[in-house]
């Protein structure tokens, strides 16, 4: 009897103790949060700027410099797309590209400006004193376009050109007809033209190319423009920035920057030289290095906030 009573008492104490422990555990569990933590608002995405460029030395250099400035100093994302000149003018006119920084006026790209008319906006020139023509090494004993017919065999019957849609190529075809040249214009690209020029000069061979200044090749090689007595290649030109309609209203800061962007011939030659010396290095990093070395000039182009 006593034994049964004792066992009952122990059982009751165990049950009571277990209940206390369970109650304590339940009280220690954290209460569920009544309100969810406030979520952070997503940061505003940077605005995008679309630039078009042709694989011409001055256009490549200026476009990537503009990209570096817009991204590093003005908070924009830039998409730079390379194409032939005709598709670029078409894209700017259609609004797919915001700006093209390598428009040669009033002659070389006059036909595109006339074709697209009011669908393009001229933001002004970024370099003065540009020219195009037929270029030969200084060691060649000719000085005029007419004299090319005297060295047709030495030239293997060819004028080394660039991309077929370029204005200089149209002028070269006109020169062949106007001067009665027994030469064929060979299309290619800016880099292939300079590679052919480099190879010929290394061997002191005859060569004639479609050339333009400013260009780093005039600093690296001893070259000369052939005299153009018929004026086929026009007079001295300026390089303009051509924009799409609406850019000035939608991104006024970008438009003003592009209007302010200006390089004299020495500055542009130095920039192009940096790209030529960089070889296969990343273009944007090359532009950033030049930007860092010319900070005062670069900052003068950026509109005040």
Image (cartoon, rainbow, N blue to C red):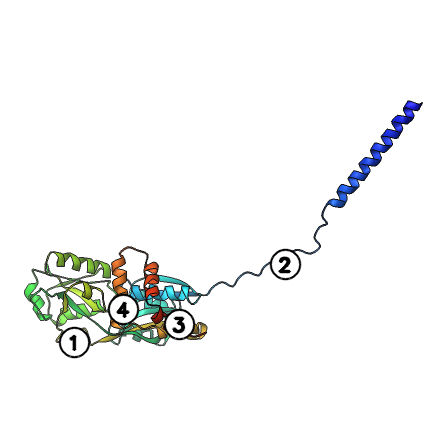
How many angstroms separate mark 3 from mark 1 (CA)? 39 Å
Which residue is found at the position 81% from the left and 38% from the top? 19
Note whether residue 27 is visible. yes
Q: CA distance from mark 1 to mark 2?
A: 71 Å
Q: Earlier in the sequence, mark 2 or mark 4?
A: 2
Quadrant, the N terminus: top right
Query: CA gap, disc 4 to disc 3?
Result: 18 Å
**Residue drawn 51% across and 63% down?**
44
Q: Nearer the viewer, residue 266 or 294?
A: 294
Q: Residue at x 16, y 60 (%)?
A: 197
Residue 142, quarter of picture: bottom left
Q: How far from the left and from the top, in percent, is residue 115?
A: 31, 73
The mark found on residue 38 in the picture is 2
Q: Is residue 179 rendered to the left or right of residue 265? A: left
Residue 202 versus residue 22 in the image, above or below:
below
Secondary structure of the residue carrying numbered label 1 = loop
Q: Residues within 10 Å of mark 1 (few under 14, many from 20)?
A: few
N-term-proximal mark, 4 vs 1: 1
Q: Nearer the viewer, residue 268 or 204?
A: 268
- Which one is in front, 174 or 40? 40
Give the Cα separation between the discs numbered 2 and 4: 52 Å
For the question of whether residue 120 can be seen, the reply is no
Residue highlighted by disc 1: 231
Q: For residue 302, which numbered disc appears in the image?
A: 3
State which quadrant residue 282 falls in: bottom left
* Mark 4, residue position: 268
| Badge 2 element | loop
Compared across the picture, whether 210 is left or right of 60 comes to: left
Crowding around mark 2 (Cα neighbors within 10 Å: few <14, some 14 to 19, many 20+) is few
Q: Is residue 282 left or right of residue 142?
A: right
């Amino acid at each position: 009897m006593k034994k049964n009573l004792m066992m009952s008492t122990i059982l009751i104490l165990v049950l009571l103790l277990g209940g206390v422990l369970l109650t304590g555990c339940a009280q220690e569990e954290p209460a569920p949060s009544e309100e969810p933590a406030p979520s952070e608002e997503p940061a505003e995405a940077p605005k995008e700027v679309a630039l078009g460029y042709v694989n011409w030395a001055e256009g490549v250099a200026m476009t990537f410099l503009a990209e570096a400035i817009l991204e590093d100093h003005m908070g924009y994302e830039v998409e730079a797309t390379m194409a032939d000149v005709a598709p670029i003018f078409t894209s700017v006119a259609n609004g797919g590209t915001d700006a093209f920084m390598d428009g040669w006026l009033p002659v070389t790209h006059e036909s595109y400006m006339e074709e697209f008319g009011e669908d393009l906006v001229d933001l002004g020139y970024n370099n003065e004193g540009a020219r195009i023509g037929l270029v030969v090494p200084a060691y060649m004993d000719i000085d005029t376009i007419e004299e090319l017919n005297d060295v047709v065999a030495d030239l293997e019957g060819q004028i080394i050109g660039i991309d077929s849609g370029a204005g200089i190529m149209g002028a070269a075809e006109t020169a062949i007809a106007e001067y009665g040249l027994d030469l064929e214009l060979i299309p290619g690209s800016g880099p292939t033209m300079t590679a052919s020029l480099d190879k010929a000069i290394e061997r002191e061979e005859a060569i004639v190319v479609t050339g333009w200044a400013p260009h780093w090749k005039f600093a690296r090689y001893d070259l000369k423009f052939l005299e153009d007595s018929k004026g086929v290649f026009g007079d001295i030109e300026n390089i303009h920035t051509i924009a799409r309609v609406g850019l000035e209203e939608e991104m006024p800061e970008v438009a003003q920057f592009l209007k302010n962007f200006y390089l004299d011939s020495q500055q542009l030659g130095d920039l192009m030289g940096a790209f030529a010396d960089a070889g296969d290095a990343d273009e944007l990093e090359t532009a950033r290095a030049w930007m860092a070395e010319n900070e005062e000039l670069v900052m003068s182009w950026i509109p005040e906030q």
